[in-house]
Image (cartoon, rainbow, N blue to C red):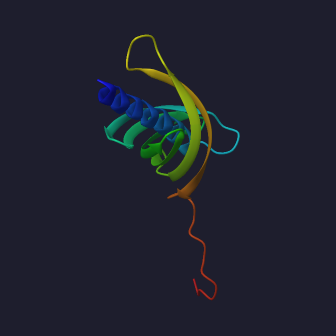
Amino acid sequence: MARMNTARSSSRRVLASTVIAIGTLGAGCGSVGAGVGVPIFPGVSIGLGLGSGGVTAGIGAGAGPIGVGVGVNHRGQVSGGIGAGVSAPVGNSDARVGVGVGTGTVLYDPHEAPSKAPGSRR
């Protein structure tokens, strides 16, 4: 029975970490986001987040209170994020609620004009 509780506890930490990471994906500095992650195997979750930057879908990985993730928002921007947080159980269920802090950055923006390379003739 202790092994089962450890597995659930690990899944809950991964979920909390993923929520934090996904929540930071579409958000820049000074923004707020929240998300839901679904563990696909230990340490990795897929998720959906909503923040001031819009809707983001992505994948995250976590260990303990630390989580990282990569996602794509509704404008096609690819972002990466990292966060840390804590969570607590909701009643007697497997659901958890958490809070954390993190940071994210846009890795690719399809709407941003590519910069010209030095010496380019175009």
Residue at the image position 45 percent from the left and 10 percent from the top: 91
In depth, the one of 54 and 5 nearer the eye is 5
Find residue 82 and report its horizontal and vertical position in percent.
Answer: 56, 47
In depth, the one of 118 and 96 nearer the eye is 96
Residue at the image position 41 percent from the left and 20 percent from the top: 95
Task: Please give left or right for residue 75 compared with residue 37 in the image.
Answer: right
Task: Please give left or right for residue 98 compared with residue 71 in the image.
Answer: right
Q: Is residue 10 above or below residue 107?
A: above
In depth, the one of 45 and 73 nearer the eye is 45
Find residue 110 and report its horizontal and vertical position in percent.
Answer: 50, 58
Task: Please give left or right for residue 69 compared with residue 82 in the image.
Answer: left
Q: Quadrant of the N terminus?
A: top left
Q: Quadrant of the C terminus?
A: bottom right
- Total marks drawn? 0
> Can the viewer see residue 118?
yes
Quarter of the figure with residue 121:
bottom right
> Can the viewer see residue 26?
no
Kindly give the residue lying farthest to the right in the view shown. 30
Q: Is residue 43 above or below residue 8?
A: below
Kindly give the residue lying farthest to the front in the view shown. 2
Kindly give the residue lying farthest to the top in the view shown. 91
Find residue 116 and report its horizontal and vertical position in percent.
Answer: 60, 77
Quarter of the figure with residue 14:
top left
Task: Please give left or right for residue 112 compared with residue 92 in the image.
Answer: right
Find residue 17 and report its horizontal and vertical position in percent.
Answer: 49, 38
